[in-house]
Image (cartoon, rainbow, N blue to C red):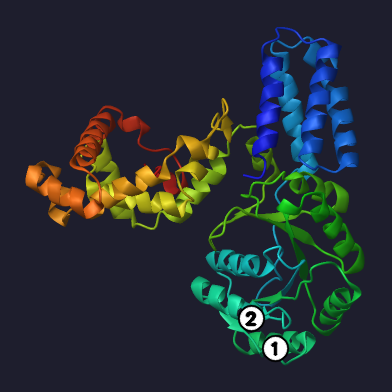
Amino acid sequence: MAFESLTDKLQNVFKGLRSKGRLTEADVKAACKEVKMALLEADVNFKVVKQFIKTVEERAVGADVMNGLNPGQMVIKIVNEELVNLMGSEGAEIQFQPGKAITVIMMCGLQGAGKTTTTAKLAGKFKQKGKKSLLVACDVYRPAAIKQLQVNGEKQGVEVFSMGDGHNPVDIAKAAYEHAAKNNFNVVILDTAGRLHIDETMMEELAHIKEAVTVHQTILVVDVMTGQDAVNVAKEFDEKVGIDGVILSKVDGDSRGGAALSVKAVTGKPIFYAGMGEKLSDLEQFYPDRMANRILGMGDVLSLIEKAQEAIDIDEEKEKEMAKRMQKGKFDFEDYLESMKQMRNMGGISSILSMLPGMGMNLGGADLESMIDEKQIARMEAIVLSMTVEERRNPKVLNPSRKHRIAKGAGVDIATVNRFIKQFEQSQKMMKKMPGMMGGMGKKGKFRLPF
């Protein structure tokens, strides 16, 4: 995630605080100085950092912290609360027009920020909410922009309105609205053109679209990998065009991530969503409290549960049956394949573990990517896929000749196959002994983790 380095540095600061039985004012100031440096290195706006540290220090030097039973934990709590305040206190949602009225959303941003992909991701989110969206190709300048929107729209099962690149974007927006009204669409999403940098021509075009069509929400897509520039872009767009909120893209990238901490404080506009990957499903609603927990290495269990609920597409009866099988230790290789599918839908095991408390992006100098051998996981899946349906459902039939055939089909040696089968058998025994650990509560009380 974009906050790997910041998370690591803050955890080191807090580790030092936890080791102290009692904190002095000097301890608090020294810790705040280190937090300040970590935030600045993460490219958080200087003025934002200055006010943030002032607030934390004033609260942390208070009598409650000095006399607390666990002052180190109290300071962490204060930092967490102030991070939440910095990013907007509460999650913000894109507002729709009431009843059957059409909501028009205009997407804007600089070229390369991931605007067109984010537009399609957003349409997918709205579809899950029961909205019928119309994607509109208003970027007539960038080569392949229209095709990109059409391809992504098709993947999301959302219609794309296009008049080609020979028409004015204002005329396209007006025609799209008329098409939406005639065909019972309730959301129109305009994918407007970006530029390599902000210029008057782009701003004028956006203003003209707003004059021609009633735009209810103007959303800016900013790339967090551009650091402080992302905040400057947000500020300028808001001043010249007026924005209602922001979507952060490439939050999963290897960047300093300070934009997420600065954009709300600088512009006053909420962050609606965060793009957490390249897949069209990788768009998460932005919750300041959850993001603060991730930054401080506290995990994000609520988002993990929501991801799991979206990923689990099996019917209720099949879910009950699999839960019973797991509790009885009868979880077979067919179930294993289903679980791997669900795990991939949730972003992979690294993504899942990074959301668990205590599993921050850097553990004693070893990051999750290096700890988890994704190639090894792929090899295990290849072994299962090389089995027949009978062998997956009844592993007891796996004699030496069958194992040799499976090893050859998976491109591994026989020892790897034997080791995997033995580990699988051990897992079955563990499941039988610990049925209470096979799942947690979620939607309808039936949520379970797919591994």
Counting from the top left corner in percent of width and height, residue 273 is at 67, 56
For label 2, the crowd category at 10 Å Cα-Cα, with few meaning under 14, some 14 to 19 and many 20 or more, is: many
Give the amino acid at mark 1.
Asp
Counting from the top left corner in percent of width and height, residue 395 is at 14, 44
Counting from the top left corner in percent of width and height, residue 320 is at 30, 48
> Residue placed at 26% from the left, 41% from the top?
324
Mark 2 residue element: helix
Counting from the top left corner in percent of width and height, residue 373 is at 42, 40
Q: Is residue 406 above or below residue 437?
A: below
Give the quarter of the image for residue 37: top right
Closest to the observer, 263 or 93: 263
One can see residue 412 in this view: yes
* Residues at circles 2 and 1 in contact by the CB criterion of under 8 Å: yes
Give the amino acid at mark 2.
Ile
**Left or right: 68, with 423 as reference point:** right
* Quarter placement of the C terminus: top left
**Left or right: 398, with 126 as reference point:** left
Q: Is residue 32 above or below residue 393?
A: above
According to the picture, the residue beneath numbered tag 2 turns out to be 146
> Residue placed at 21% from the left, 38% from the top?
421
Q: Is residue 128 above or below residue 420?
A: below
Residue sitting at the far bottom: 166
> Residue placed at 87% from the left, 49% from the top?
266
For label 1, the crowd category at 10 Å Cα-Cα, with few meaning under 14, some 14 to 19 and many 20 or more, is: some
One can see residue 319 in this view: no
According to the picture, the residue beneath numbered tag 1 turns out to be 165
